[in-house]
Each structure stands twice: as structure tokens, then as C-alpha cells.
Amino acid sequence: MQQTAQDLGITLHMKLQDDNYTSQQMAEDIRNLVRFEFDDSEHGHNHNVPQIDGLIVTIPDDIVKEAVEEVVYAGIHVFGFNLGYDILREDNKDHHLIGYVAQDEFMAGALAAEEFATRRLAELGPPQTAIFVNHNRNDPALTKRFEGFNFTLYQMYGIVADHLIVDPAEFYETILNVDNAIEACKYDFVLLGGAETVSAVTAAYDHHLCDAYFREEDEESVMLGLYANVTELLNLNLEIRRPMVIGAFDATHEILDAIAVKHIEFTLVNQKHIQSALPVLLSTIYASTGQKLNLPHDGEIYMSGPQVVDIDNMPSDSFIGCALEAFPICPRNGEPLQTICPCIDRSQQSFMA
């Protein structure tokens, strides 16, 4: 956001949230963007005076939504990103937002279910069990991911996914709850809501040998080994327990490391750089010209995700580092930047139109 604002020559006031920043505080800050003045003329009346040209905001819940609606009514141009477009959609009102850039979290959960179906377990017949591991019961994005995952699995296979909610702050309790949940590798599909439970799930995965094929024999599990060739295994005509397949969301180092060692099969990501830069660009154009893009024909938002990442298209460590530093741009005055990622020299970029 800051780099895009600098490129455009506008002033961007950033107020970053933290764990102590409540929805009530956020709503109050949004309402304070409107100043109320009184006209002293003969027919004077109170009127609202926006103090900014636009607001770029994520909407985590109804408390913030109400504040956003008020400032829109007062004349502030609002562009949404990340969370909240589904909250606005639920009451089916025209909120007059300039636009929204986000990942459709319900669609992301649905895509996870479809992605599982294309993975190696599909070769062994329809799955029977699935679980979603939720690390924050109060996060609406995780709720939507589970709903999309569960709905699609039921549509495809008649499966109702289990929903395990844990608190990563309670480390040992989380380890125990996850280990108990997937005891005997009883799930075909395990979907992590994010990176917060990677260590707990992969520890349980190793503890219960969930990457191995077993055959049941006299009430005892006999390990057959790690068969790379599924067809060869099927030709044995044995009753088998299949390997558990894990999927996730986000592209943190923990998740990508787990993909590299094949603990996690895939992860779903959104393009956070685009999700941050595009609202600044489109809001600035709207404030200057009054023009905005039409929303996509088949949706209500500009989609920043989801996209599938697996062992075949994992980003490099250098790319991840640059993404964390928002792909820094070299200053025009030639001053060096204190960044790990080499800055991008735009004077060397060339395009044709």
C-alpha cells in the first residue's frame, strides 16, 4: 500500500491493527473521519464534511460494517479489501463501495475439497472422512473456509467434515487435541485453516505413521511400506488403510517446508501484494476522475485468490523474502535501501503499449 501511494504521489495514513485493536475502536476511528459542521446562514443546518478523499478498509464484523455504512452515507468513498465483502452482501443492500479486492473464503474452502479429490487418494476410491482444523473460532474467514470445504465435500461424496477448534496459545493442549483427533490416521482429508497448527498436525502425522499404507491382519496393522506406485498396491488385493492427505491455507515458511518434505500436499494462497496495492490505485483514480471498473461479471469482488501451491510450483526463498518486504522499489534519488530483497529499479523496466 505504501509503495503504491508513493508511486501515485498521494498521502496514505496507515493505521495498523494488532491483537489489542478491537472492532469498537476501529469503528470509532472510522466514524471520526467525518467532521460535523454547522452552516450559519439563514437556513443553516448541520452537515457532514469528510476529512479524507477515500477510505480503504477491511470489515471483520457487523460493528465495523455499521461504521463503514455511516461514512459512505456521509460522502466518503470506500474501497474494501480482505475481509468483509460477504458481510455486506448478507443483508442485500447497495452499499455504494467503489469496489472490493479479496479472496472468496467460501470458494477457497470449496477449491480445497476439489483439490483433495484430484490428489492420490482419488485413485483409491471415494474418500469417507475429513476434518477441518480451525485455530481461531472468532475468525470469520476460517468459518467461511470450513463452510465451503464441508459443503463441497457433501456435494461430491456425501461427507460431513468434522470441525476441530483449537487454541495455538495453549500449545500442549493443542498438540494433545490434534493427536487424539487423528489417532489411527482415521481421516482421508485433513485441511488446516492456516499455519498456526502445522507443527501439531505434522507431529501427529509422524506419530501415527500416516504416510504409510497398512493392511489389516488379525486385528493388527501391518505396514506395507511407502508405495509410490498406487496401481502396484491395488494389485495386491489387500484390505488397506490409505495415507492421510493434508492441505492448508497460506504460504508461510512452516507450510512450504511441510510441502517440501511431503507432509502437506498443497496449500491455497491469495495474492496479498495485489490485494493491498490495487485498492490504493483504484481509489486514487476514482477520487481524481470519478471513474471505476465494473465488477467481474460472475462475482461481486476483484479476486486476489485462491490459487493452489504444491511441490511443483512452490515459490523460492528469495521470492518469499521479497513478498514479505512488499517487493521494494529503488529510490529515485539513488539512496540505498535497508532491505534483504534487492530493490526493483523501475528506470530499467520497459513496456510497449
Image: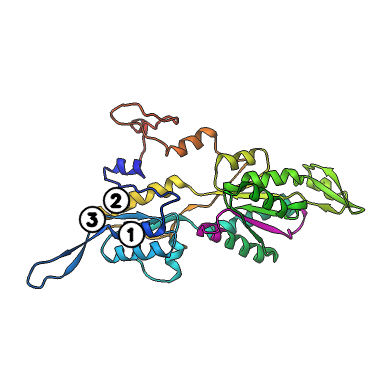
- Mark 3 or mark 2: which is in front? 3
Decide which of 146, 111 is in the foreground and name it: 146
Neighbours of disc 2 within 10 Å: few (<14), some (14-19), many (20+): some
SS at mark 1 in the image: helix
- Pinpoint residue 308: horizontal percent, then vertical percent: 57, 48
- Using the image, tell me which numbered label, if any, was put on residue 28: 1
Question: Disc 2 marks which residue?
Answer: 284
Name the residue type under label 2: Thr
First-in-chain label (3 vs 1): 1
Q: Which residues are magenta?
A: 124-145
- Pinpoint residue 247: horizontal percent, then vertical percent: 63, 50
SS at mark 3 in the image: loop
Name the residue type under label 3: Gln
Distance between the Cα atoms at labels 1 and 2?
A: 24 Å
- Pinpoint residue 198: horizontal percent, then vertical percent: 62, 45
Q: In which quadrant of the rendered image does the N terminus lie? A: top left
First-in-chain label (3 vs 2): 3
Distance between the Cα atoms at labels 3 and 2?
A: 15 Å
- Using the image, tell me which numbered label, if any, was put on residue 51: 3
- Mark 1 or mark 2: which is in front? 1
Q: Is residue 347 left or right of residue 326?
A: left
Name the residue type under label 1: Glu
Distance between the Cα atoms at labels 3 and 1?
A: 15 Å
Neighbours of disc 3 within 10 Å: few (<14), some (14-19), many (20+): few
